[in-house]
Image (cartoon, rainbow, N blue to C red):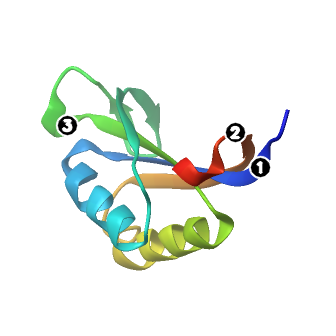
Amino acid sequence: MNLHPMKLVTIICEALLEERVVEILRQCGTHGHTAYSVRGSGSQGDRSADIVETGNVQIEIIVKPAVAEAVLERLQRDLFASYAMVAYETDVRVMRPEKF
């Protein structure tokens, strides 16, 4: 089996930011994303997935390391100071790297 190293970037943010985050992803060169409505609690209190306007969304992308770094830097620069969000990267290995 031939696996290729990539990065999984996970972004959890207010659902109202989804379109803005997706636009940043496109500008940074990503080829696609996956998004989920999520719920939980943290420093901003409880978040329910029942009401879209007040819920959270989890957005995931698999990208090359340089793209992951660009995405995380852009999110930090443009959104972190004003919105409740978390972003992190994880090492992954994928088949068919040309898809990413």
For label 3, the SS is helix
Q: Check residue 14 in the rendering and tell me which mark sits there, or answer none.
A: none
How would you rate the neighbour count of disc 3 (Cα within 10 Å): few for under 14, some for 14-19, many for 20 or more? few
- Position of 11 relative to 47 (above/below): below
Q: Check residue 54 in the rendering and tell me which mark sits there, or answer none.
A: 3
Image quadrant holding the N terminus, namely top right
- Position of 84 relative to 60 (above/below): below
Q: Amino acid at mark 1?
A: His
Residue at mark 2 to residue at mark 1: CA–CA distance: 6 Å
Residue at mark 3 to residue at mark 1: CA–CA distance: 38 Å
Q: Position of residue 18 (x, y in %)?
A: 26, 50
Residue that numbered label 2 is attached to: 95
Q: Are marks 2 and 1 in contact (CB under 8 Å)?
A: yes
- Position of 84 relative to 45 (above/below): below
Apparent side of residue 77 relative to residue 87 in the rendered image (left or right): left
For label 2, the SS is loop
Residue that numbered label 1 is attached to: 4
Q: Position of residue 5 (x, y in %)?
A: 77, 52
Name the residue nearer the viewer: 70 or 16. 70
Q: Position of residue 22 (x, y in %)?
A: 30, 56
Q: Amino acid at mark 3?
A: Thr
Upstream in sequence: badge 3 or badge 1: 1
How would you rate the neighbour count of disc 1 (Cα within 10 Å): few for under 14, some for 14-19, many for 20 or more? few
Q: Is residue 62 visible?
A: no
Residue 21 occupies which quadrant of the picture?
Answer: bottom left
Upstream in sequence: badge 2 or badge 1: 1
Residue at the (33%, 31%) spot, across then down: 47
How would you rate the neighbour count of disc 2 (Cα within 10 Å): few for under 14, some for 14-19, many for 20 or more? few
